[in-house]
Image (cartoon, rainbow, N blue to C red):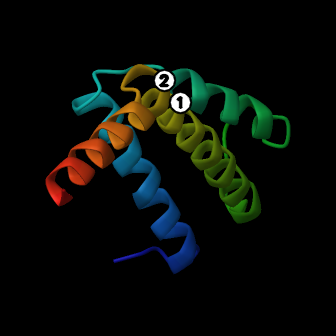
Amino acid sequence: MLPAFISPILAQRILRTGKSINFLRACCEDSGWVDAAAEAAACVGGTTRSGGLGYGETDTLEALVVEAAKRIDQHLMDVIHKRYRFKDHCLANQEISSTWAG
């Protein structure tokens, strides 16, 4: 059940970002997402009163969620590509597949 002031699209974005954070924490044992989230809050924070959201500031909430999602997604991609060398993994799978194909 969603509050009336949160659109379904915003709710999906919040859920996806939460899943990314959970993956980073649980599977990658990474805490760098905290910095990404703090940077997003600081970026959008200039538009909020005393560092928090007030009643009816749905545009600010949406801007904060969008900015946080963008930064956390970028951090997730960095972790996957740099720490876990995703490209090398894909190339190895391709090599194995071509070997099996004959």
Q: Residue at x 54, y 44 (%)?
A: 73
Q: CA distance from mark 2 to mark 1?
A: 6 Å
Check disc 1 and report its element: helix, strand or loop: helix
| Depth check, front residue: 70 or 102 | 102
The image shows residue 31, relative to residue 99, as above or below, that is above
- The percent coordinates of residue 75 (x first, y second) are 54, 32
Label 2 sits on residue: 82
Q: Which residue is mark 1?
A: 78
Residue at 46% across, 69% down = 12
Where residue 22 is drawn, which disc sits there?
none
Identified by mark 1, the residue type is: Asp
Q: Nearer the viewer, residue 62 or 21?
A: 21
Looking at the rendering, in which quadrant would you find the N terminus?
bottom left
Q: Is 41 on the left-hand or right-hand side of 74?
A: right
Q: Quadrant of the C terminus?
A: bottom left
Residue closest to the far front: 102
